[in-house]
Amino acid sequence: MIDNPEIPSIMTIKPVRAGYAEIDESPKRLNQSFGLMGAIWLLGLIGYLTPLTEWPALWLYVLGSITLVFYRGYGRGEWNEMFMGREGLSKSLKWGGIAGIFLFVMDITNTWLYYSNGGKPMIEMEMILVGKSLLLFPLLVLAEEFLWRGIMFSAMLQQGYNKHLVVVLTTLFYVVNHFAVAPVGLFERALMAMMAFPIGIIGGYIVLRSQNVWGSVLLHMLTMGSMMLDIFVIPKLIFG
């Protein structure tokens, strides 16, 4: 007779808790980013049709985007998944700096030619910048990059969308959004949307290649600096 090894009658299996990074949360991020976009556009339309103006939509845009990203990053540990961690950071910043300097020079040149040929200064935007403080604009840049080329861009890629389609769609959403949230006339909104298009395309491909959003943030900050010169400095140099 061969003795069998003792087999315990009760086997205890310890549960393994999956961390947030091990769970694919991209569908939730995609739904939340599209939901926020829809709410911003709806509020912008209401503001356009009523005395509210677009300021409530602009504040929802800024605070909603930053809050959503901080919730997903700090609360769910998804910084890398949203392309906001350290992975690809140096590559992203390098190309963001190069592209940002190129767009800076191009914007200054185009603006100088625009004003020299009789173009009108962006009076409404200048009044907003003076009256509402320049502090809004760094926050606005972060909100725009976090929403379009951060949480939405990364979620679409992770859901299997064509990478070039992701660049184009997020750029178009970003461009159209200027008509929903900019509390200025339609002509100045159109000018801002035109300036936004190359930022969206170039920033999108920087994020696509580096898997990191911070180069696009740098690019955007540099072009925002050129816009300050467009509004405050160049008109005075040309018109006196």
Image (tube, rainbow, N blue to C red):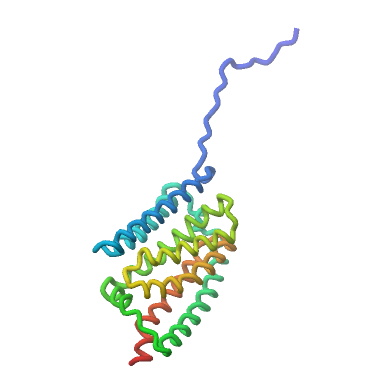
Q: Name the quadrant of the N terminus.
A: top right
Please, is residue 157 above or below residue 235 in the view?
above
The picture places residue 154, in percent across and down from the top left corner, at: 52, 55
Q: Nearer the viewer, residue 107 or 186?
A: 186
Is 94 left, or right, of 139 in this rendering?
A: right
Q: Name the quadrant of the C terminus.
A: bottom left
Splitting the image into 4 quarters, where does residue 38 fall?
bottom left
Please, is residue 125 above or below residue 13 in the view?
below
Q: Nearer the viewer, residue 182 or 213?
A: 182
Please, is residue 12 above or below residue 48 in the view?
above
The residue lying furthest to the top in this view is: 1
The picture places residue 67, in percent across and down from the top left corner, at: 37, 54
The picture places residue 62, in percent across and down from the top left corner, at: 36, 61
- Residue in view at x 54 percent, y 63 percent: 168
- Residue in view at x 54 percent, y 62 percent: 167
- Residue in view at x 45 percent, y 75 percent: 223
Please, is residue 20 above or below residue 153 in the view?
above
The picture places residue 222, in percent across and down from the top left corner, at: 45, 74
Is 182 left, or right, of 29 in this rendering?
A: left
How many numbered dots are placed on residues in this image? Answer: 0
Is 120 left, or right, of 222 in this rendering?
A: left
The residue lying furthest to the front in this view is: 49
The residue lying furthest to the left in this view is: 51
- Residue in view at x 47 percent, y 67 percent: 217
